Amino acid sequence: MEIQKIGVIGAGQMGSGIAQVAAQSGYEVVLMDVEELSLKKGLEAIRRSLDRFLRKEKITQEEADATLARIKTTLNPADFADCDLVVEAIVENESVKGKLFQTLDKVVKPEAVFASNTSSIPITKLASYTTRPERFIGMHFMNPVPLMKLVEVIRGYKTTDEVTRLVMATAEKMGKVPVEVNDYPGFVSNRVLIPMLNEAIQAVMEGVATPEAIDTVMKLGMNHPMGPLTLADFIGLDTVLAIMEVLYEGFGDSKYRPSPLLKKMVQAGLLGRKSGQGFYKYDEKGNKIGS
Ligand code: NAI
């Protein structure tokens, strides 16, 4: 089987980026959302990103135009009927994703592969909403999709070798580096990253050092591009907490206990960059303005 047409569902931050890289690599793309406005915003984000590549002379005007011409938008899942691969990137909610996959299972041709970009919901669980768990896989892109190289490819319990190979090859054709992992809570990326952020938050709570000091230690000492507390603010403290809870529940091990300070900040509405305050303060454009 060869992938020619890719359906992307959810035109938000991740879905618009996935649609862009797929179209840039020559695939025919159908991008779907539940709202016309989201589709419009998604296409605008794609245009802005292509413009940046154009200004840096990474692509030509013809390539930018051809990319846009390969993307069709729709509000109707029936338009995915003849897609070879459907990548889901909607809200991180199991029952909403589950309902969508039940609908897709009925309208998309049976040999098509389904992929989810979920950051924390078990792939095996999502696959169980369909009659094709063998053809269901995780394709976990990183944000911002057009710039980040990694795609974590997550095999569900029943995912076949053939589907895994096909999806790895498709990610490579999109210019990405796919890495195969198995379906355990947090996969690899979030299982290793998020407890580190939680530990940095715990260190703030215990008064070990200030957020600035902790970030400086990790930036200069470990050569990380961004300190853990800056990164936690960037991801969103509510998201960090939600992933810690998935790890805690999934493994039942106290080493994944969310920091009480993290919980308290989320309860207080301090969610990081998106709410204007987390470990640091931000202006309306999301620029850091202090602590
Ligand atoms: P977002 O909120 O920017 O976009 C979600 C889009 O899905 C919205 O446009 C919304 O209108 C649409 N949508 C919601 N329900 C829908 C439905 N039933 N059918 C069609 N469209 C629907 O969210 P974002 O950040 O793009 O995240 C999407 C997925 O990617 C989530 O599963 C998230 O966990 C995952 N992810 C997010 C990362 C990030 O850094 N933001 C990184 C890696 C994965």
Image (spheres, helix red, strand yellow):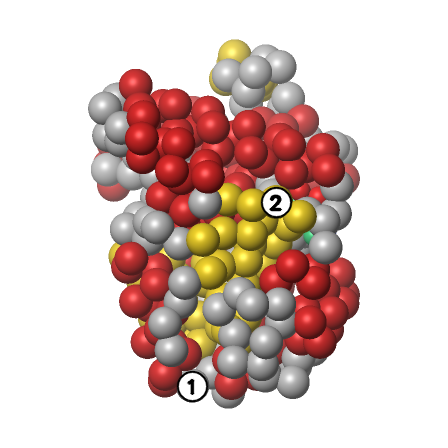
The answer to which of marks 1 and 2 sits earlier in the sequence is: 2
**Secondary structure at numbered mark 2:** strand
Q: Nearer the viewer, residue 110 or 214?
A: 110
**Secondary structure at numbered mark 1:** loop
- How many residues crowd around disc 2 within 10 Å: few (fewer than 14), some, or many (20 or more)? many
Q: Label 1, on which residue?
A: 160
Q: Nearer the viewer, residue 160 or 123?
A: 160
Instruction: Give left or right: position of 138 versus 268.
Output: left
Asked whether disc 1 touches disc 2, contact meaning CB atoms under 8 Å apart, the reply is no
The percent coordinates of residue 215 (x first, y second) are 39, 31
Amino acid type at circle 1 is Thr
When asked about the image quadrant of residue 171, the answer is bottom left
- How many residues crowd around disc 1 within 10 Å: few (fewer than 14), some, or many (20 or more)? some
Q: Nearer the viewer, residue 54 or 198?
A: 54
Q: With respect to residue 267, does 44 lie above or below?
A: above
Q: CA distance from mark 1 to mark 2?
A: 30 Å
- Residue 124 visible to the viewer: no
Q: Nearer the viewer, residue 85 or 211?
A: 85
When asked about the image quadrant of residue 37, the answer is top right
The percent coordinates of residue 221 (x first, y second) are 24, 36
Q: Residue at x 33, y 49 (%)?
A: 25
Q: With respect to residue 51, does 238 lie above or below?
A: below
When asked about the image quadrant of residue 247, the answer is bottom right
The percent coordinates of residue 4 (x first, y second) are 41, 63
Q: Residue at x 64, y 21 (%)?
A: 276
Q: Label 2, on which residue?
A: 73
Instruction: Give left or right: position of 191 versus 64.
Output: right
